[in-house]
Amino acid sequence: MKAMCLWCFGVVADASAAGAAAVVDAGALRVATLSLGEVQLPVLRIGASVLADVAKHDAELAAAVVGAGALAALGRLLSSRDASVRAHALRALAQVGKWGRESGERLRAEMHPTLVSLVGDRDEAVCQNAATCVRAPRRAAPRRASLARRAGRHADPCLLYTSDAADEEDS
């Protein structure tokens, strides 16, 4: 029953920014955040997806996800044995981190070592979502695209992850 309720919140939040705002106004972020403490894997995955679906629309909604205490709860899911739980948590963290310097820096400051270790995960979805979370600032993006062109293939974010330090050395 919990998973079905959360799934409904996710469908509404995924549809539009107005739907995501309605989910926030209804108090569903607290429910989704609390669901991340459950033991049932579907509830964990869907709860993380709801948070990602809310955060993906704009910075204000992403701030609401952070304000609901979701960063710490999502961070705890990164050590899950289940790869799909880790992937869903990382997707939510990536959606929060993409909306501005402050949220991205806070995310990297609190979880950087864990995120970097997950870039090498065996699961492709975990690897790609972790790489998205720890990507260098936008100034490094053209450098990674250039590396991919020189390699003659499309870039796999897991293979082209570069740290801020490596980018600064090249400058």
Image: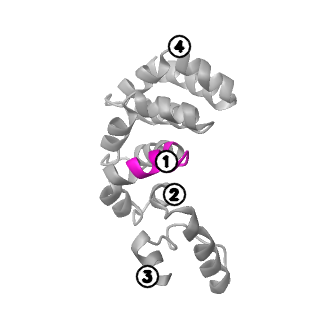
Mark 3 neighbour class, 10 Å CA radius: few under 14, some 14 to 19, many 20 or more: few
Q: Amino acid at mark 1?
A: Gly
Residue at the image point whose x is 46% and y is 50% from the top: 104
How far apart marks 2 and 1 lie (CA) works out to: 9 Å
The amino acid beneath tag 2 is: Thr
The answer to whether mark 4 and mark 1 are in CB contact below 8 A is no
Q: Is residue 131 left or right of residue 111?
A: right
Mark 4 or mark 1: which comes first in sequence? 4
In percent of width and height, residue 135 lies at: 49, 62
Query: Is label 2 in contact with label 1 (beta carbons under 8 Å)?
Result: yes
For image coordinates 30% across by 41% down, the residue present is 76
Circle 1: element type: helix
Precedes in sequence: disc 1 or disc 3: 1
Q: Tag 4's secondary structure?
A: loop
Task: Mark yes or no: residue 157 visible.
Answer: yes
| 27 and 153: which is toward the camera | 27
Residue beneath disc 1: 97
Q: Amino acid at mark 3?
A: Glu
Residue of label 3? 169
**Secondary structure found at label 2:** helix
User: Which numbered circle lies on residue 38?
Assistant: none
Frontmost of labels 1 and 3 is 3
Disc 2 target residue: 132
Residue at x 61%, y 26% (from the top left corner) = 20
Estimate the x, y position of residue 115 in percent, counting from the top left.
37, 57
Which amino acid type is shown beneath numbered disc 4?
A: Ala
User: Is residue 105 located in the magenta-colored stretch of the structure?
Assistant: yes
Mark 4 vs mark 3: give the one in front. Answer: 3
Q: Around disc 4, counting alpha carbons within 10 Å, would you say few (fewer than 14), some (14 to 19), or many (20 or more)?
A: few
